[in-house]
Image (cartoon, rainbow, N blue to C red):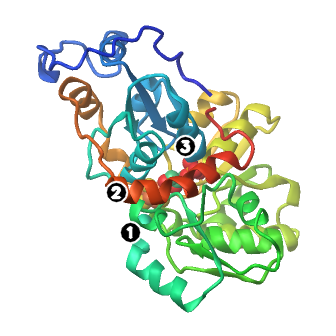
Amino acid sequence: MSALSAPSTINANATAPFAMAPSTSKASIGSPEWAARIHSLAKERDAVILAHNYQLPVIQDVGHHVGDSLALSRIAATAAESTIIFCGVHFMAETAKILSPEKRVLIPDANAGCSLADSLTADQLRAWKAENPGAVVVSYVNTTAAVKAETDICCTSSNAVEVVASIPADTPVLFGPDQFLGAHVRRVLKRDNIKVWGGECHVHAGINGAQLSAQAAANPDADLYIHPECGCATSALYLATSGAVPADRIKILSTGEMVTAAAASKSRKVLVATEVGMIHQLKRAAPGIDFRAVNDRASCGYMKMITADKLMASLVELRDEVHVAPEIADRARGAVQRMIAIGSAGGGE
Ligand code: 13P
Ligand code: SF4
């Protein structure tokens, strides 16, 4: 889904600092005047603004494209603009830089990290590989560039199953770092030669089976949209097999797939198990559905570090620029390119 059309005018020479500092703008944040100022600066900078589905609503609304990790990676790889402003977390901006090393990639706050990406280091992955010679390494996109450089194929939540299915069935796989996504892949493919790293995202791990069961019991008419990083993904399948919730009401989906499913849904109520920023995009896609967060405190502090003021400052001052050492980027690029080649369109494309 494109929230807005990409800028059509390109001015590759517009790199000088702008006279107007963010604080001198009189437009209130989120107003049409503020959005027009952001888009005008983006046009002058020859920049495209990409926003992940977990961003603050004001950032989602002003992004040229809003989507999931796979969709935004694909857009970053093919964008006509010379600058990418990535409103997301650091590994996403790094992925864009790996795919488009000739472009300037900016993130409004370089401190926007990811607990899941922190749960597997390149040294740990090298040691794991040494213990498992011959295994193919599949890494979730929520990893550092150094981990991607040690990886055979990256994946996102929307194509993890297809990526692992592309590997011959008798070849062992090392899947990291997310234990819940890894368990989901093992379950769907019924494949037991997949070793899964024990990492997790603190936000998704905190959405647990007890919360899901209680919400499902209180809302028997609701569909359930569950992100595969969630601690409750296994409980969701238990709800289906025990008959507590009809199986066709339970959907394990990436954030982009949730938007696509909502737009096509005839349901009146949906329980959403993922980061709470998702609800904004779901309401835009299906205003008639009552969306409820399974855990309304599941907010990612890293994603919320990207504020409206920082986006404006990023455009004005061209910061924070993301760099990936060329030797790391060169080794990581094949794994990321294989990722964007596999799987159907992510939500946002
Ligand atoms: P997707 O947008 O690919 O579903 O990823 C979710 C996520 O946790 C990103 O950090
Ligand atoms: Fe990382 Fe979790 Fe935040 Fe996504 S929600 S960026 S996986 S910490």
At mark 1, the secondary structure is helix
Location of residue 145 by image quarter: bottom left
| Kind of residue sitting beneath label 2 | Gly
Image disc number at residue 118: 1
Q: Is residue 74 above or below residue 287?
A: below
| Residue drawn 88% across the image and 69% down it | 243
Q: Quadrant of the C terminus?
A: top right
| Residue drawn 80% across the image and 39% down it | 267
Label 2 or label 3, whichever comes before in sequence order:
2
Discs 2, 3 touching: Cβ within 8 Å:
no
The percent position of residue 339, horizontal first and vertical second, equals 62, 52
Question: Is the CB of mark 2 within 8 Å of ligand 2?
Answer: yes
The percent position of residue 268, horizontal first and vertical second, equals 76, 37
Pick whichever, 213 or 167, lies toward us. 167
289 displayed left or right of 293: right
Label 2 or label 1, whichever comes before in sequence order:
2
Tell me the residue that label 3 is attached to: 278
Q: Quadrant of the N terminus?
A: top right
The answer to whether one can see residue 131 in this image is: yes
